[in-house]
């Protein structure tokens, strides 16, 4: 049986798909690739079926990741029965997810797994900015992914 993680942002074309790709690779590097299933979604559905934002994909490619297979999806409340951990990119999406979540669901901010991040740290939405915002998101996601991989290694093994 696999442990399932879903990363969630607003439209599922920038932050959460970047986090999905990075976390999947980080978990594989830590020997957890066969134990943890990673996917992503958005709280909004207007981008369903669309590929990742081209700027997000370009930054991932530049750093050796492949996000080409991504297609946006909307998070559904029914998924809580299938997902062990839901990670929001920001406080607004965290609130939406917690309203949808049944009692006992594990819903947190992604950056809560980055030991260097301040309490309630968010992954900012780079959509309306330039390339630097996507690079910043990548660095935040990498740090949180390392922390999450260490947490899951201690928890699942």
Image: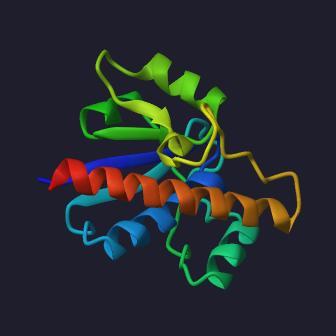
Residue 85 vs 140, above or below: the answer is: above
Quadrant housing residue 104:
top left
Farthest left residue in view: 1
Residue 115 percent location from the top left of the image = 52, 47
Q: Residue furthest front?
A: 116
The answer to whether residue 108 is above or below residue 14 is above
Total label count? 0
| 40 on left or right of 153 | right
Give the camera-side residue of 76 and 110.
110
| For residue 106, side relative to residue 48 (left or right) | left
Front one among 129 and 53: 129
Of 79 and 131, the residue lying toward us = 131
Residue visible at 58% across and 57% down? 141
Q: Position of residue 78 (x, y in %)?
A: 33, 30
Q: Does residue 98 appear to the left or right of 111 in the view shown?
A: left
Q: Which residue: 79% across, 53% down?
A: 127
Query: What is the image's colouring?
Result: rainbow
In which quadrant of the rendered image does the C terminus lie?
A: bottom left
Answer whether residue 89 is visible to the viewer in this image.
Answer: yes
Could you tell me residue 155's position as x and y percent? 21, 47
Q: Position of residue 16 (x, y in %)?
A: 56, 52
Specify the quadrant of the image occupied by residue 105: top left
Please say whether residue 74 is visible from this viewpoint: no
The residue depicted at 63 percent of the width and 75 percent of the height is 60
As rendered, which of 51 and 30 lies closer to the eye? 30
Examine the rendered structure and indicate whether residue 102 appears above or below residue 5: above
The answer to whether 67 is drawn above or below residue 119 in the figure is: below
- At 63% across and 81% down in the image, what residue appears? 63
């Amino acid at each position: 049986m696999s442990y399932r993680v879903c990363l969630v942002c607003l439209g599922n074309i920038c932050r959460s798909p970047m986090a999905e790709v990075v976390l999947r690779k980080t978990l594989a590097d830590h020997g957890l690739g066969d134990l943890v299933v990673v996917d992503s979604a958005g709280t909004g559905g207007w981008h369903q079926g669309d590929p990742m934002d081209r700027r997000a994909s370009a930054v991932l490619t530049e750093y050796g990741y492949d996000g080409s297979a991504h297609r946006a999806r909307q998070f559904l409340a029914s998924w809580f029965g299938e997902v062990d951990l839901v990670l929001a990119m920001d406080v607004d999406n965290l609130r939406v997810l917690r309203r949808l979540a049944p009692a006992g669901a594990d819903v947190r901010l992604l950056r809560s797994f980055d030991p260097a991040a301040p309490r309630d740290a968010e992954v900012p939405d780079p959509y309306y900015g330039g390339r630097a915002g996507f690079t910043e998101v990548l660095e935040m996601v990498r740090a949180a992914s390392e922390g999450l991989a260490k947490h899951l290694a201690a928890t699942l093994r």
